[in-house]
């Protein structure tokens, strides 16, 4: 009896898969079925029950009106291009300035103490105030300082509200990004510096070739996180006047007394932020896999 | 016997209230090999790190070719160029392949062209059986291979002295041999070296002088035959008795 069982267990299966592979395939199929089943039931309940709610007709009319959606889509999508432009201009500036601030906070030379102090104060002050408040302060304050009233759409002109809004985003986000970089720089083990310095490499070359490449690699996932936030926060520039997607949707909403344009704007933001989020998750998972062995189930 | 390469005069070093080196006097001749032995925390690593100016000393002096390299305020980089160092944990750069690890400092510090640095690196990697690993990243290599790469990396700077800080302590026993073989080659080439080690048989074979450190002082020094066969200081006798008891000699 015992011998027969053992034979059965160790005999190669007809499919040529190992015992474990067969077991895991069965488990995988079961999991997929269960996931599909539970998702289907939940979706079904929503589709079946939600339209029965009292307010559904009203909500459907004011938020999901087909006609308004298609009418509003083109103008809102055009305005959304301004959001994308602001993002594309601000993001690289934020990376560069954030890195410079992070490096300033790490300098140890007494001669450069003012730089370190300034960088530390900058990060503390900027992060201590809500972003929308910075937009008002820099936007209206800057406009007053330069004595301009132009709202400025299209090509960026210095002194316009659009420009000042961009400045506010760069100012605030570079402080957050600087802290991410600093964490990365401090995360590189001291022995890497010893190794580099022992070879006669200067402080600069050590940072440039040994510390920073490792630091940056390590912080790419948290950095992506900040840029997903930025991608949405560009809409805040609208508080200063520039007509980007949110503002355009608001204008149309005013005219039609229907909230569907906001849904249009939301869909457009999702079209960009979901791929960004997925990419960040993928990078995070990859990093985790590299750091540890097999996942525990 | 010969010219002096490195001389330690009353070297003192403390970390806060803890004195780590308490007056080290030692002379290393050109082509000499000094083994530093002693328990963990006796100051072996600190002495090596101070020699490469990775740690500043508090008092005393270290002379390289008669020149005080520990003078406060002196630029450390030109000194480090002349002194190679290999660490217990390799300290290879994980984001670079072997060839880049080995050619980085010749290019940036010595100003060699990429082609020159690569030629020279490949010749040495070839010599030590690492040529086929040139384009691999350090984490694909065994510990022994990583440590050999670290030695090659230090040698590419053409140093006058090599400092080896317990370079086999992080290795699996079967990988120790390949690293020690490389050190033996260096010794045959006449490289001046100071090394901290727990491999007593290796110290006995390679070193011309063995120093036993205890609490930051050299309690006893002499030729290996004398230190290992007839130690005079009670602390040395006790240390070696413990080493023998644990089967490491």
Image (tube, coloured by chain):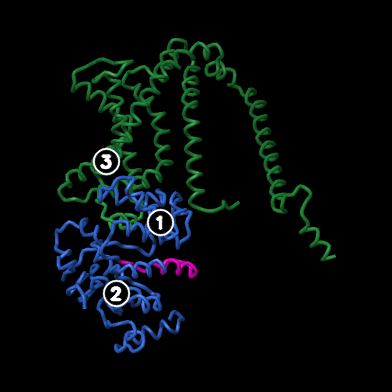
Chain colours: A green, B blue
**Which residues are the magenta region?**
B163-180
The residue that mark 3 highlights is A101
The spot of residue A81 in percent (x, y) is 41, 19
Mark 2, other Cα within 10 Å: few <14 / some 14–19 / many ≥20: many
Question: What residue do we see at 33% from left, 82% from top?
Answer: B224
Numbered disc 3: secondary structure: helix
Q: Which mark is residue B125?
A: 1
Q: Chain of mark 1?
A: B
Front-lying residue, B127 or A118: B127
- Is label 2 or label 1 in front? 1
Q: Is residue A272 magenta?
A: no
Q: CA distance from mark 3 to mark 2?
A: 46 Å
User: Looking at the rendering, in which quadrant would you find the N terminus of chain B?
Assistant: bottom left
Q: Which residue is mark 2?
A: B34
**Rendering coords of residue A91 (x, y %):** 35, 31
Q: Is residue B85 above or below residue B20?
A: above
- Taking B198 as reference, is A242 above or below it? above
Instruction: Tell me if B130 is positioned left or right of A93 in this view.
Output: right
Pinpoint the chain carrying mark 3.
Answer: A
| Up/down of B177 relative to A270, above or below | below
Mark 2 vs 1, N-terminal side = 2
User: Which tag is nearer the camera, tag 3 or tag 1?
Assistant: 1
Question: Is residue B89 at all visible to an observer of this figure?
Answer: yes
The quarter of the image holding the C terminus of chain B is bottom left
Q: Position of residue A4 (x, y in %)?
A: 84, 62
Circle 1 crowding by C-alpha within 10 Å: few under 14, some 14–19, many from 20: many
């Amino acid at each position: 009896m015992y011998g027969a069982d053992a034979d059965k267990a160790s005999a190669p299966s007809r499919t040529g898969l190992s015992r474990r592979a067969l077991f895991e395939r069965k488990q995988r199929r079961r999991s997929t079925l269960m996931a599909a089943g539970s998702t289907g039931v939940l979706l079904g309940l929503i589709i079946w029950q939600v339209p029965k709610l009292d307010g559904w007709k009203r909500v459907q009319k004011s938020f999901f009106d087909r006609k308004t959606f298609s009418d509003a889509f083109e103008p809102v999508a055009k305005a959304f291009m301004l959001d994308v432009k602001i993002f594309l201009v601000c993001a690289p500036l934020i990376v560069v300035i954030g890195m410079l601030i992070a490096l300033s906070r790490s300098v140890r030379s007494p001669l450069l103490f003012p730089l370190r102090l300034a960088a530390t104060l900058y990060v503390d002050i900027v992060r201590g105030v809500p972003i929308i408040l910075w937009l008002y302060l820099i936007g209206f304050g800057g406009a007053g300082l330069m004595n301009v009233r132009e709202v400025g759409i299209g090509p960026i002109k210095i002194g316009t509200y659009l420009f000042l809004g961009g400045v506010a985003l760069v100012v605030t986000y570079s402080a957050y990004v600087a802290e991410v970089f600093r964490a990365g720089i401090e995360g590189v083990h001291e022995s890497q510096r010893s190794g580099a310095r022992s070879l006669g490499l200067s402080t600069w070359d050590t940072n440039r070739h040994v510390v920073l490449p490792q630091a940056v690699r390590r912080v790419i996932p948290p950095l992506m996180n900040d840029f997903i936030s930025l991608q949405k926060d560009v809409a805040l520039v609208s508080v200063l006047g520039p007509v980007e997607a949110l503002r355009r949707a608001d204008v149309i909403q005013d005219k039609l007394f229907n909230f569907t344009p906001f849904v249009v704007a939301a869909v457009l933001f999702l079209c960009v932020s979901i791929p960004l989020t997925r990419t960040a998750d993928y990078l995070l998972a990859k990093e985790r896999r590299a750091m540890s062995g097999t996942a525990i189930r | 016997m010969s010219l002096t390469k490195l001389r330690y005069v009353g070297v003192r070093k403390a970390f806060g209230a803890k004195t780590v080196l308490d007056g080290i006097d030692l002379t290393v001749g050109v082509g000499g090999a000094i083994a530093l032995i002693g328990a963990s925390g006796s100051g072996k690593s600190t002495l090596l790190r101070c020699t490469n100016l990775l740690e500043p000393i508090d008092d005393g002096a270290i002379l390289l070719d008669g020149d005080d390299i520990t003078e406060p305020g002196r630029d450390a980089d030109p000194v480090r160029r002349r002194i190679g160092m290999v660490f217990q944990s390799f300290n290879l750069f994980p984001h670079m392949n072997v060839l880049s690890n080995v050619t980085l400092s010749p290019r940036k510090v010595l100003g060699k062209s990429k082609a020159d640095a690569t030629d020279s690196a490949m010749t040495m990697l070839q010599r030590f059986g690492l040529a086929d690993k040139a384009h691999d990243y350090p984490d694909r290599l065994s510990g022994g291979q990583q440590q050999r790469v670290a030695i090659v990396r230090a040698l590419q700077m053409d140093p006058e002295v090599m400092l080896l800080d317990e370079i086999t302590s992080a290795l699996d026993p079967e990988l120790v041999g390949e690293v020690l073989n490389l050190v033996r080659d260096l010794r045959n080439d006449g490289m001046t070296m100071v090394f901290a080690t727990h491999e007593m048989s290796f110290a006995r074979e390679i070193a011309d002088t063995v120093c036993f450190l205890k609490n930051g002082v050299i309690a006893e020094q002499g030729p290996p035959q004398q230190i290992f066969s007839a130690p005079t200081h009670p602390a040395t006798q006790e240390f070696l008795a413990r080493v023998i008891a644990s089967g490491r000699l």
